[in-house]
Each structure stands twice: as C-alpha cells, then as structure tokens.
Image (tube, helix red, strand yellow):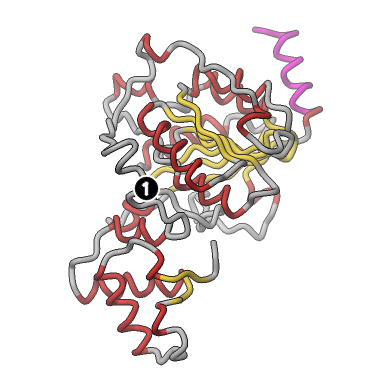
Amino acid sequence: MASSFCLHSFAVSRAVKQAVCSLVLLHKFPSSLQPNYCISRTFAFACASASFAANKELRSPDLVALEYADLNLTDKISQELGHVRIRQHVNPLSSSLSVPAPVPDWSEVFRDPTLPLMVDIGSGSGRFLMLLAKQNPDSQNYLGLEIRAKLVKRAEFWVKELALSNIHFVFANATISFKQLVSIYPGPLMLVSILCPDPHFKKRHHKRRVVQKPLVDSILTSLIPGGKVFIQSDVLEVAIDMRKQFDSESDALKHIDKVDPSVLCDGEGWLLNNPMGIRTEREIHAEFEGAKIYRRLYQKKDSSKLEERLLAGVENPN
C-alpha cells in the first residue's frame, strides 16, 4: 500500500476527516501536513477506529473507502452505468452458467501477456485486484473471474478509467472456465486467490461452493512450481471446507509456514496476518463486525513430484 495519501483527494466521510484532523492536532504532527490532511494509511485507520469509539457515525463503508482511497473510483460510473444492484447469491450449477467463458486475446487485454499472472476467483467489485494492479503495473498481470455479470461490467469500466493495462475481468463460472482460460495464457500462473467465497450455508447447497475437487485439480495442474494458492473466509465452516480440499493435496502443496518458518500461524494453523497487505471489501466489513478471518497460503512443490503422483494415479486407478 502507498505510504501516504491526501484525504482532500478522495471521497471519505466527514466523520473520518474530522477524526483525522482531531488526531493530527492531538498528536502534534508537523503543521505542514495539517492543511492537506496528508497522512499514513496506518494512521488513518487508527483515526477511523478512534472516531468510531468517540461517536457511532463511522461505518464499514468508510473503512472500505480508506482502504481503496488510492483508486478514487467514487461516482465515476454514475452517468455511464448507473447504479449497479448486486445479487448476492448465484447458483453456479444453473444451466445458464454451464457454458465456458470465451478466452480473450491476451495480447489485447494485457500490455505484456507474458508477465506472471494472478487469478482471483470470485473477484466481486474488483477493487482489491485493481489496487494490486496499480501497485505493480510492470511486474504482474491480474485476472478477475466473477460470476455476476454486472460486477464485471462495472469493473471493466473502472479499469478503463484508471488506464490500467495489466488487469482484466471475465464474466465466468470458475468451475467451468478456469482451466481453459489459464491454459492458453502465455505467461506463468503464479498465484490463485479464493477470498471469502459465497458460503452457501444450507447443507443441500454445499455442492454450489466454489472449492470442489475439479477446480482444485485444475489449479494444481496450472500453477508453476513455487506458485501459490491463497484462501480465506470469515466463516469458519467454509474455511475448514476449503482447507481440507487443499490440505489433502500434500503431495503437491506445502503450507507456507513449512516453506518459510518466519510466517506466523495460530495454534490451529491459520495465518496470523494477511500476506497480500490489502484487504478485500468483505474482509473489511467482517473485521469491522468483530469477525475473525481464517487464512491459508499454500505453495506448489517441485513439478516432477506432482507428475510422479499423477502418473501413479493413472497407472493404478484403483
């Protein structure tokens, strides 16, 4: 994340600005900073928390605005797209979502289609991925797969407004389209993220959850050695379900703390910190409400070991 930003440049609530102003004065920051409200983002979040403690006006959307302030996207869609009403739950098993998404011409959507690729499955509004793309314009490409068409349309509009050439969004059912999309990408697949997916709470709807064996297999065969899978959820049941799917692939994957002992986990094996350095909107809302975020980060082992395992499976199908 950027080390500082100016509140005058972004659409954050009056409550946040007032809290920032008050705390700047309270902590006696240099007077040169005060007229422009230019502060570190870490300090801004401290201000926001203090504002909430002082008065109950602060809401989680204010924290979302702070997290994505560098994008400055507010009101940019009002005239061209209008208000985007979001359907929260979609059935990925419906016949209308069973058709594979067309594979784009990668040379048209990315300035350099050979750069390492990150795929975010269930990219939502896309702001999380856009901020990453803005921060890494020359080193990585970003692909968001989203099952709600209106969100994809709005995200692509924002990408054009931001003039980003290393990010693209596709309206797709990841279960159906992931393998086909990434198999034709010219560069290496370095990272796949599945962040706070739809929990589909009812037992009869668990089959709608995105992390199923076919998708896991597609991810494993598509990642390059050393590539990573990052999963998280604020719903423990869903987090455990995803974790079981990837933990069961121990021949192909290692959890990151086994690769790098400096990465800290709690007693249950969940990451203590967000390795991305940027929170998703759902993550912000959940933490604002006091929920815990359950995270796991896996790294793919050497490809020869995976090939041996897959070959053994073919030779001994039973």
Q: Residue shown at 64%/48% (left/top)?
A: 256
Please state, as top left, top right, bottom left or bottom right, where the N terminus lies in the image: bottom right
Q: Is residue 126 left or right of residue 103?
A: left
Q: Residue shown at 54%/65% (left/top)?
A: 2
Q: How crowded is mark 1: few (under 14 residues within 10 Å), some or many (20 or more)?
A: some
In terms of secondary structure, what is the magenta stretch mainly? Answer: helix
Q: Which x, y percent locates residue 249?
A: 62, 29
Compared to residue 96, the image places residue 104 above or below, namely below
Regarding mark 1 in the picture, which secondary structure is present there? loop
Mark 1 belongs to which amino acid? Lys
**Of 265 and 136, which appears nearest the observer?**
136
- In this view, the residue farthest toward the right is 304
Q: Which x, y percent locates residue 285?
A: 32, 52
**Of 235 and 172, which appears nearest the observer?**
172
Q: Residue shown at 72%/18% (left/top)?
A: 310
Give the quarter of the image for residue 105: top right
The boundaries of the magenta stretch are 305-318
Q: Is residue 307 magenta?
A: yes
Compared to residue 256, the image places residue 30 above or below, namely below
Residue hosting label 1: 76
Q: Residue shown at 73%/32% (left/top)?
A: 187
Q: Which x, y percent locates residue 10?
A: 38, 63
